[in-house]
Amino acid sequence: MNKSKERILASAKELFHEYGFQQTSVDEILKKSGVTKSNFYYHFKSKEELGLIILQRFITLYESDVLIKTLGNKSLSPSGRLVEFYNSVKTFHINLENPRGCPFGNMAIEMSGSNENFREKLSAFFNSWEKIIEECINEGMSTGDFRGDLPPGVVAQLILSHLEGAIMMVKTHRSLEPLSSGSETIMRLLKAA
Amino acid sequence: MNKSKERILASAKELFHEYGFQQTSVDEILKKSGVTKSNFYYHFKSKEELGLIILQRFITLYESDVLIKTLGNKSLSPSGRLVEFYNSVKTFHINLENPRGCPFGNMAIEMSGSNENFREKLSAFFNSWEKIIEECINEGMSTGDFRGDLPPGVVAQLILSHLEGAIMMVKTHRSLEPLSSGSETIMRLLKAA
DNA sequence: CAGTTAGGACTGACTGGTCGGTACTAATTC
DNA sequence: GAATTAGTACCGACCAGTCAGTCCTAACTG
């Protein structure tokens, strides 16, 4: 059911990630998904609505498929979880022939200045992402995985900021190195003395 | 002389920073600068050419007015230079009622995937920026300002990645906190044991 | 000095094309 | 019979970019 709707969502998701929201036209989405324009506007009242739905889906999927399975994986040590998380991010970006950047970071920069709906959703998601990292850091400080002389919330914020910046560098330099080298350095800096 | 040309450059620089390159139309630049379209194309052969010129100007200005005066200020200690640099970045972003993000980071995310001219210029600039940070870190490791158990180039890369990510967060959360808190944490992590 | 030439700065009207979105009819599917 | 898909023509706004031609000043020429 809703075959067209799903095809629109799948095509738009890829196009938004590759070219950005504003730089993707509705016509391109129709062409890629093989759906007619009237059918598009039967399912979505506007391009913005589509964008917000895709963003929400991506957030939900990322939380359940990546964040919970790595940072929330209680069968690993806290530092092992963080390493697993970095690995999953690297895998995600290495699988694209040309780095496209972080879907969330790209959208944040593109939309935060011009659309409050996108900005608020992204701001809330970054906060929740940060909380998940913080939980892992906090536990790692108890177990002695990580140095305990810094507030875990502040460390989590630093990790997320650095991650987004590193992915930006990966996209700009067309090399995974800033992410792999940066994540290793983060791990070293967090090691207990 | 060239009053129109300078007005176009000044207006476009602001608009590109606030809305991005692609989201700023030539007509908007004309409206803001009060210049006619034909005059615009008398001075610039395309919107892309204008964008590259503005980017180059911004890079040159930033290197001479910010990077050299902070990270290259030999009258300060290496760690004092880094603090000064962070202060200048914070001042830059606090002076805008709404955070617009880093002009270079914004452009990198927006253009790296679709325009090689922009991507290469930005990639080269990030490398040169990194080198300036590295020089400061390297000296600080000699003086004992910073811990010496990490390669300075890797640390510099981490600092720049984190900075760009933190500015992205400032823009998304509409709060300076990720940058001020993050920079303090970086300083603490780099302190010699 | 008068007449000509050159060239940079500038103009308004215009082009072909794309944008997101609408209107409306008709067929197909569950 | 209600939800979905298809088709297609259309809209006004906007897009980057072009054009022939004017204005003004300064240098050259007789």
Image (cartoon, coloured by chain):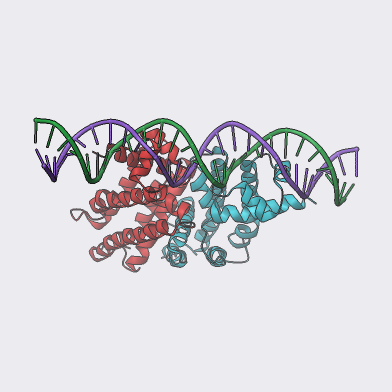
Chain colours: A cyan, B red, C green, D purple
| Numbered circles on residues, count | 0
Q: Position of residue A121 (x, y in %)?
A: 58, 43
Residue beneath the point at 47% across and 60% down:
A171
Above or below, B34 against B131 in this view is: above
Would residue A135 be visible to someone looking at this image? no
Q: Quadrant of the N terminus of chain B?
A: top left
Quarter-of-image position of residue B91:
top left
Q: Camera-side residue: A75 or B70?
A: B70
Point out residue B26 in the picture as x, y percentages from the top left corner: 43, 41
Q: Position of residue A185 (x, y in %)?
A: 42, 65
Residue sitting nearer the eye, B164 or D10:
D10
Q: Give the quadrant of residue A117.
A: top right
Quadrant for the C terminus of chain B in the image = bottom left
Observer able to see residue B42: yes
**Horizontal side of residue A134 vs A3, given as left or right:** left
**Residue at 71%, 51% in the rendered image:** A35
Frontmost residue, B101 versus A138 = B101
